[in-house]
Amino acid sequence: MFFELGRAFTKFFTPLNVFSYLTFRGAYAALTTLLICFLFGGRIIGALRKLKIGQSVRTDGPATHLAKTGTPTMGGIFIIGSVVISMLLWGNPGSKMVWIALISFIAFGSIGFFDDYLKVTRHNSEGLPAWAKLAGQFVFALAIVLYLYFSMDSDVTSLYIPFFKNPVIDMGPLWIPFGVLLIVGESNAVNFTDGLDGLLAGLLILVFISLAIVTYISGRTDFSAYLGIPYIPGAGELTVLCLAIGGALIGFLWFNSHPAEVLMGDVGSLSLGGIVAVISLIIKKEILLLIIGGVFVLEIASVIIQVASYKLRKKRVFKMAPLHHHFELSGWAEAKVVTRFWILGGLFAIIALSTLKIQ
């Protein structure tokens, strides 16, 4: 809205030209989502509590988590809602990249919503069957990747690897299954990480700040040329979206910090994981995403290793998977696990951003 307002009336009132600046709109998009969460978060939590939308906790997990039973969940709803409102105000409505990212955000959030809804109504930790959840993710991911494949330029199938200026390989049609697996894998990796108060929100704040920097650089011919990374026309608009999500996560963390007043739920974790992957596909940073979200990679890897080891050897590698539960059962306090994982996430983000220069 403000972008169109500025473009229409700048010739009559030049200060309105400020709405054309990505940094200005990005900052206020973040402030908007932050204020929405601050102002309405408490009311939404109260409504969730009144509707008895509470978390069901796994009985085979750490005993300390049983106290979280009944904590309002599905808090991801107000993350998604605040971001959509903010982007309608501060985004460029003509940006196809923003629209495809927002659609993926809502689509994966809808899968998480149904999963959370079934958990709440059944009063247990079992939501959608695993096959149904994966099927939904694959369908949405395939639709998104096919759209990107046929609507973006020929460089869309090129695979870039950190430390190399030029694409390593043109994947051609194989980019389609690669993109689908990246979206589904990242969505589930983020979902697995959501197990401790404030853990996922804090890590995602670091991820979206990093993506905001990379999208801004990728959308500028001068910066991208200087750093030797692919220039993606229009990618700068994703900076506004990344900062809006970052602001929403900071607002959510206010209520989600230990002891949590509300939990994100699958509606939040699946949607956020999905949009992170979609943005990385658009800006050609698929491999860099694995570094930026290094903690998510470790979390999902611990689950894969645990399951494979138990099926093949009937032995567990970790005391419990995902990885954060292993450290809890090893004697670390929940707050210590969260803080140390945040530090690790910060290190991954710094390493990822440093690769932009070392090419």
Image (spheres, helix red, strand yellow):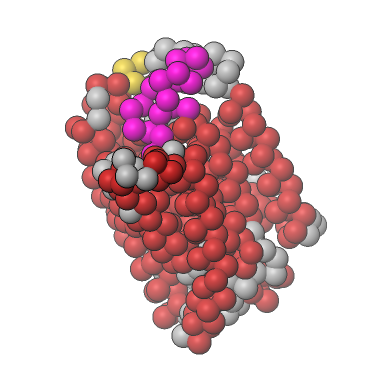
Seen from the viewer's position, the closer of residues 39 and 46 is 39
Seen in the picture, residue 71 relative to 90 is either above or below; the reply is: below
* Residue 308 as seen in the image, left or right of residue 106: right
Name of the residue lying farthest toward the left: 150
Q: Position of residue 24 (x, y in %)?
A: 49, 43
Residue depicted at 48% across the width and 27% down the height:
217
In reply to whether residue 3 is colored magenta, the answer given is no
Seen in the picture, residue 131 relative to 341 is either above or below; the reply is: below
Residue depicted at 75% across the width and 59% down the height:
335
* Residue 29 as seen in the image, left or right of residue 104: right
Q: Position of residue 256 (x, y in %)?
A: 62, 65
Seen from the viewer's position, the closer of residues 339 and 27 is 27
Q: Position of residue 102 (x, y in %)?
A: 34, 51
* Residue 21 as seen in the image, left or right of residue 10: right
Q: Quadrant of residue 12?
A: top left
Seen in the picture, residue 134 relative to 120 is either above or below; the reply is: above
Q: Which residues are magenta?
A: 217-240
* Residue 235 as seen in the image, left or right of residue 65: left
Q: Position of residue 106 (x, y in %)?
A: 34, 57
Looking at the rendering, in which quadrant would you find the C terminus? top right
Seen from the viewer's position, the closer of residues 119 and 274 is 274
Seen in the picture, residue 228 relative to 38 is either above or below; the reply is: above
In reply to whether residue 239 is colored magenta, the answer given is yes
